[in-house]
Amino acid sequence: MVHFSEQLHSFNAPLAYVTLAHNMRFPSPYSAHVLSSDVIARTFEAPGTLRTTRLILKRGKMPPWAPRAFTQIGTSWVVEVTECDLEREGGKELRVKSRNIDHKTIMEVVEWQRFVEDEADSMATTAKTVTRVTSEFGFWPLRSRIEKFGISRGSKSTEHARAGLALVVSLLLSPTTSGALLSSGPLNPYPFDPLPSNLALASELVRARFEEARRLRAEGGDPAASDSPKRRLWRERWRDAATNGVSTFRSRVCSITGLLCDKKGV
């Protein structure tokens, strides 16, 4: 069985900026799984098509239910072919096709993308993405599960790639960042700040509160005294609820078994 997925998206930028951003989208904070991207061929074909071939190394994790035969697979090579048609009769367009060249028996992912000018707005770009996932590993139930996993992971990767592309487009449109981005070379890439995860943000918040409590305790103060009245009110409510819960539990045990009655004072 073969699984397909199709997605549509619109960028609020002309096709020329989207095309330039697509060729400069790495490195990106939204594509941390991309380890390397190298141009291995670039040709100019008549009547006006620029064809670029890239070799991309990506990393990823297999699901916990995956067979042991390929649980250790951590990277995959992807070939991406980009065609920028500048003199097409129906209008300019950017075509992208990518596929993995290893581990194809386990899972082969082929993705087609097409970027064209929006028919209603020439200052916008419409993107269509079609993904096909096939697997020839094992029997039919396992193949279908692998293909469904590839489709779900491919949809998330497409969303991240779209966000990274929109980020580069915004940098190109901004006068304060376009110069630095255009002047950066392959040995000196534009410095993207990594996006912190939700776990990292929560850890930073807990660490900040812990350091504040430690500082107040070292100064001889009460950490609870710095809390807001609303926070203190909720803390008292939780304490009362816990006390009432313990009392209710002891009373029920006392009435049924006769135990814990002395601790309750009955």
Image: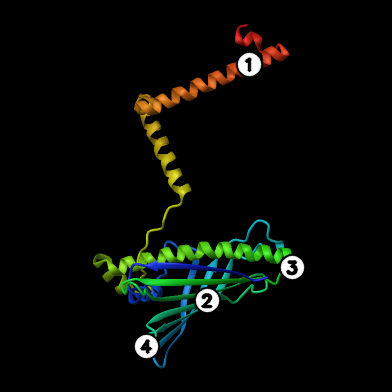
| Disc 1, SS | helix
Q: Of the residues under marks 4 and 3, which one precedes in the sequence? A: 4
- Residue annotated with mark 1: 250
Per the rendering, the mark at residue 87 is 4
Q: Of the residues under marks 3 and 2, which one precedes in the sequence? A: 2
Report x, y in % for residue 16: 33, 77
Report x, y in % for residue 62: 62, 61
Q: CA distance from mark 4 to mark 2?
A: 23 Å
Question: Which residue type does callout 3 highlight?
Answer: Gly
Q: CA distance from mark 1 to mark 4?
A: 83 Å
Per the rendering, the mark at residue 98 is 2
Question: Which residue type does callout 2 highlight?
Answer: Ser
Report x, y in % for residue 263: 62, 11
Question: Which residue type does callout 4 highlight?
Answer: Glu
- Residue annotated with mark 3: 138
| Disc 2, SS | strand
